[in-house]
């Protein structure tokens, strides 16, 4: 399955000097609001109740940083339960696929980027951060979860937008993730390329996040950011599942390469140089 997302160029030279959202290109997929790109997930499709229900995911890019936000009924630290081998069922890892191939093909080729952001999950990644050359694996079996997407959907939890607005139907989800294969929801292997900065709900709101605009402000909203140079650029499909596979979400978008933006002081110096040069030209003109 190939994904071809059109891009629209936005921004200006002045905006490039500031930390503002989506100053480069944006994709036609996703839903854009206030500089963020949103995937809006169905409500009521979290097997096990509201505490396993994802409401949405959003990304925002600046000239040098990627921001990610998640909202739903699952706290960052997960849900304490005897049903999991570790005693906690929480968020899996986040995957970015820039290849245009389906998830299974990209994983088998170690071509995914992955982000481990939840300390309590059963990831194969040793620490929080961004990973390249990633393959994925499933931990649903040790979290009292589903052995496949078909198992999940056939249990009565299919809704339109069960995987979010960018993989809106059951068939689209099967085409991308596989129908009877395992729900691969954490990093199996990869190379750590950099760290992440965790952000509170208030910090995200200050950065313009607004899930409430889509009636999707969950009981738990959190996020993280990382350097844009750690990840690929171009059209992507981002996805993640809970460790049990009780819900998942996917988001299509586009990341521009990191921009080489002059520091404000450098720009001021260039402006002063321009004024000096123009003054010199005026004086020379007066002497003529």
Image (tube, grey):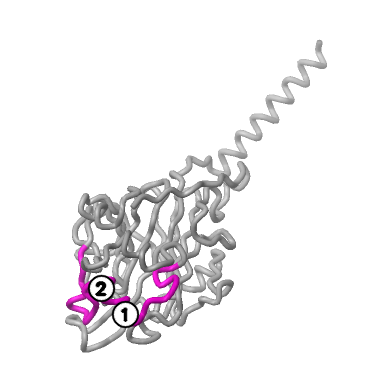
Q: Is residue 22 above or below residue 283?
A: below
Question: Relative to 212, does residue 37 appear above or below in the rendering?
Answer: above
Q: Is mark 2 on a helix, strand or loop?
A: loop
Marks 2,1: beta carbons within 8 A: yes
Residue 56 figure quarter = bottom left
**Residue indicated by mark 2:** 121
**The magenta segment:** 137-164
Q: Find residue 131 and name its label.
A: none
**Count of residue discs:** 2
| Residue 141 is inside the magenta segment | yes
Q: How crowded is mark 2: few (under 14 residues within 10 Å), some or many (20 or more)?
A: many
Figure quadrant of the C terminus: top right
**Residue 171, position as x, y percentages in the image:** 36, 65
* Residue appearing at x 55%, y 49% in the figure: 23
Q: Observer-nearest residue: 202 or 185? A: 185
Asked whether, in this view, residue 235 is left or right of residue 1, the answer is right
Horizontal placement of 42 versus 151: left or right? right
């Amino acid at each position: 399955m190939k994904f071809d997302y059109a891009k629209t160029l936005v921004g200006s030279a002045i905006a490039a000097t500031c930390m503002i959202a989506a100053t480069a290109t944006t994709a036609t997929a996703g839903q854009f609001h206030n500089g963020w790109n949103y995937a809006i997930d169905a409500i009521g499709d979290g097997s096990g109740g509201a505490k396993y229900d994802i409401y949405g995911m959003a990304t925002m890019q600046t000239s040098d940083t990627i921001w990610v936000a998640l909202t739903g009924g699952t706290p960052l630290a997960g849900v304490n339960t005897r049903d999991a081998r570790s005693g906690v069922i929480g968020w899996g890892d986040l995957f970015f696929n820039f290849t245009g191939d389906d998830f299974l093909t990209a994983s088998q080729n170690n071509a995914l980027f992955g982000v481990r952001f939840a300390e309590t999950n059963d990831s194969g990644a040793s620490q929080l951060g961004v990973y390249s050359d990633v393959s994925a694996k499933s931990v649903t079996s040790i979290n009292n979860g589903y052995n496949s997407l078909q198992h999940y959907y056939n249990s009565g939890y299919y809704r339109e937008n069960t995987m979010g607005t960018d993989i809106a139907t059951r068939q689209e989800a099967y085409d991308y993730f596989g129908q009877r294969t395992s729900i691969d929801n954490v990093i199996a292997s990869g190379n750590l390329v950099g760290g992440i900065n965790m952000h509170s709900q208030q910090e995200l709101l200050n950065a313009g996040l607004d899930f409430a605009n889509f009636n999707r402000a969950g009981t738990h909203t959190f996020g993280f950011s990382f350097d844009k140079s750690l990840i690929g650029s171009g059209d992507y499909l981002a996805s993640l599942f809970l460790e049990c596979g009780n819900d998942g979400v996917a988001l299509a978008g586009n990341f521009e390469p990191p921009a080489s933006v002059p520091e404000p002081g450098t720009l001021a110096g260039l402006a002063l140089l321009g004024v000096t040069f123009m003054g010199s030209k005026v004086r020379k003109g007066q002497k003529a």
